[in-house]
Image: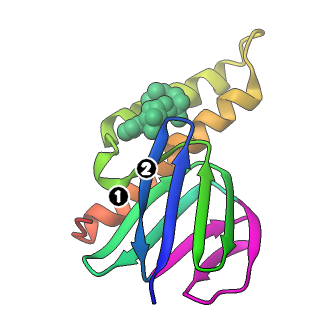
Amino acid sequence: MPMRLEILTAEGVLFDGDVDSVVAPGSEGELGILPSHAALMTMLQPGELRYRTAEGESYLAVHGGFMEVRSDHVIVLADAAEHVDSIDAERAEEAVRRAEERIAARGADMDIERALASLRRAQVRVRITRRRRQQGHSP
Ligand code: ATP
């Protein structure tokens, strides 16, 4: 029996459908979810979330948030998330450079938390596009 996975971000519903499995970057490490999994609620760290459907495996960058599992229903509420195919790798690389420059310059008006969060998001995007595109995956 499949599970229902919903991935919600501030911008709307990124995915809503039946899946066979989910692997998510939980705050304590990678978490694999199969049907009939025990109920749980966890924070997510920025990283890769993948899910498998009859069509194959799909890969997403998720940038924090949390996940709830209850009765074969997985809800991911992410601060932001993108499917690997919709990530603009050049934009992410540019964002890494910008964030690094901003942090290195240590401007008096720099919001360090914001700069680090932006760097982390961009690094996750770069890492996931590199890993998945090199492997020739096309989710
Ligand atoms: P940038 O500095 O490149 O705008 P950002 O970290 O400020 O990156 P976010 O605030 O995390 O961007 O995201 C804003 C929106 O843009 C979100 O919808 C996010 O999914 C999307 N987004 C950000 N970077 C990319 C990217 N490299 N490829 C595709 N979508 C992206």
List x then y, in percent, for residue 27. Answer: 74, 64
Q: Nearer the viewer, residue 61 or 55?
A: 55
Residue at the spot of label 2: 14
Q: Is residue 120 magenta?
A: no
| Rendered residue at 48%/81% (across/down) | 21
In x, y percent, where is residue 19?
A: 42, 76
Magenta span: 21-43
The disc labelled 1 sits on which kind of residue? Arg
Look at the picture and state if 54 lies above or below 5. below
Specify the quadrant of the image occupied by residue 88: top left
Q: Is residue 96 something that shows in the picture?
A: no
The residue shown at (27%, 66%) is: 139
* Distance Cα–Cα, label 1 vs label 2: 22 Å
Q: Residue 106, can we see it?
A: yes
Q: Quadrant of residue 135?
A: bottom left
Q: Nearer the viewer, residue 38 or 49?
A: 38
Which residue is tagged 1?
130
